[in-house]
Image (cartoon, rainbow, N blue to C red):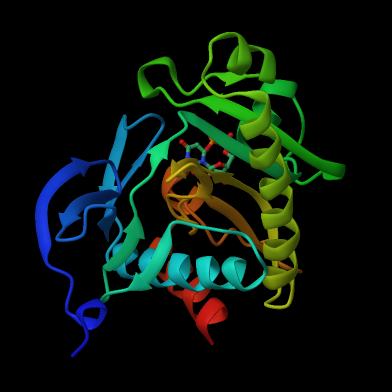
């Protein structure tokens, strides 16, 4: 067996977030990302468990990262290891959450006093400063550049990639009778390259079934709509099937 084919050794846990854990491996620049069933909302003031969510989100994220890579969008994804774990490149995360919206929902509906469901004339890109205690406040590129959170060059790459991801995913989900309402992305640097990181799953995307407008995402948990596990399984079926 060649060296690169050896099984990756899981080392020390270096980070535990709300939905994922990160572990070191025997390779310096690679980590294991493990997906948990824990669910939180409203800055972790609402907590619960969505049985099977970790497995679903790991598999959906892997499939979507593979799709994006095949279309030229570089990501931190290396390979799927098992039901709950993927091997990823270690990133120095830019502390902003990039949101792209195609249809008004959630935070934008609230902020602007709009009905959910308005189809936007063009996608909206938002930056939120990653800080739970401050409720991930909305910021703009002046805040980002003035405070050196990122720079013009990197922001340009982040914006371009985010819109590319939107085009690719909107198309992919539409073929599966799902509308991609909005989603959140995180980016980070790996060996001086800006890569897409984190996850892409029903935890981080709003997905509405075409026709019925049934919500098939974390809003079922946030808003106590029921059938939470079923919704996640349905998305997995459509993504993998
Ligand atoms: N989102 C996320 N993590 C966050 C906040 C939002 O993944 O910390 C996702 C959310 O699932 C939705 C999109 O980003 O798909 C836009 O969320 P929004 O700003 O409307 O905030 P929310 O309604 O979740 O408070």
Pick the quarter of the image with the C terminus.
bottom right
Q: What residue lies at 75% left-to-right and 68% top-to-bottom?
A: 171
Q: Residue 110's quadrant in the figure?
A: top right
96 or 238: which is nearer to us?
Answer: 96
Q: Residue extending furthest right?
A: 121
Q: Is residue 105 visible?
A: no
Name the residue: 67% across, 31% down. 153
Q: Is residue 13 above or below residue 109?
A: below
Vertical position of residue 215 compared to residue 7: above or below: above
Q: Nearer the viewer, residue 65 or 232?
A: 65
Q: Residue at x 26, y 47 (%)?
A: 48
Q: Furthest-left residue in view? A: 12
**Residue 62 percent location from the top left of the image:** 44, 70
Picture residue at 22% right of the left edge, 53% below the top:
28
Can you see residue 122? yes
Split into quadrants, the picture shows ligand 1 in the one at top right
Q: Position of residue 180 (x, y in %)?
A: 68, 58
Q: Position of residue 131 (x, y in %)?
A: 40, 22
């Amino acid at each position: 067996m060649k060296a690169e084919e050896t099984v990756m050794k899981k080392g020390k846990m270096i980070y535990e977030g709300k939905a994922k854990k990160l572990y070191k491996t025997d390779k310096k620049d690679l980590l294991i990302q493990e997906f948990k069933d824990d669910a939180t909302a409203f800055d972790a003031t609402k907590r619960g468990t969505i049985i099977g969510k970790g497995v679903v989100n790991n598999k959906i994220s892997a499939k979507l990262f593979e799709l994006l890579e095949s279309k030229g969008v570089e990501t931190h994804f290396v390979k799927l290891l098992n039901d709950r774990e993927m091997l990823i490149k270690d990133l120095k995360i830019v502390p902003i959450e990039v949101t792209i919206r195609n249809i008004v929902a959630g935070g934008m509906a609230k902020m602007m006093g709009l009905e959910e469901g308005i189809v936007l004339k063009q996608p909206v890109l938002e930056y939120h400063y990653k800080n739970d205690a401050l409720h991930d406040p909305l910021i703009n590129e002046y805040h980002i550049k003035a405070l050196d959170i990122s720079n013009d060059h990197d922001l340009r790459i982040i914006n371009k990639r985010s819109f590319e991801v939107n085009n690719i995913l909107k198309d992919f989900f539409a073929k599966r009778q799902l509308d991609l309402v909005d989603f959140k992305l995180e980016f980070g640097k790996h060996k001086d390259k800006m890569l897409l990181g984190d996850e892409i799953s029903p935890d981080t995307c709003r997905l509405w079934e075409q026709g019925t407008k049934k919500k098939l995402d974390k809003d079922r948990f946030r808003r106590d709509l029921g059938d939470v596990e079923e919704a996640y399984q349905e998305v997995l079926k459509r993504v993998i099937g």
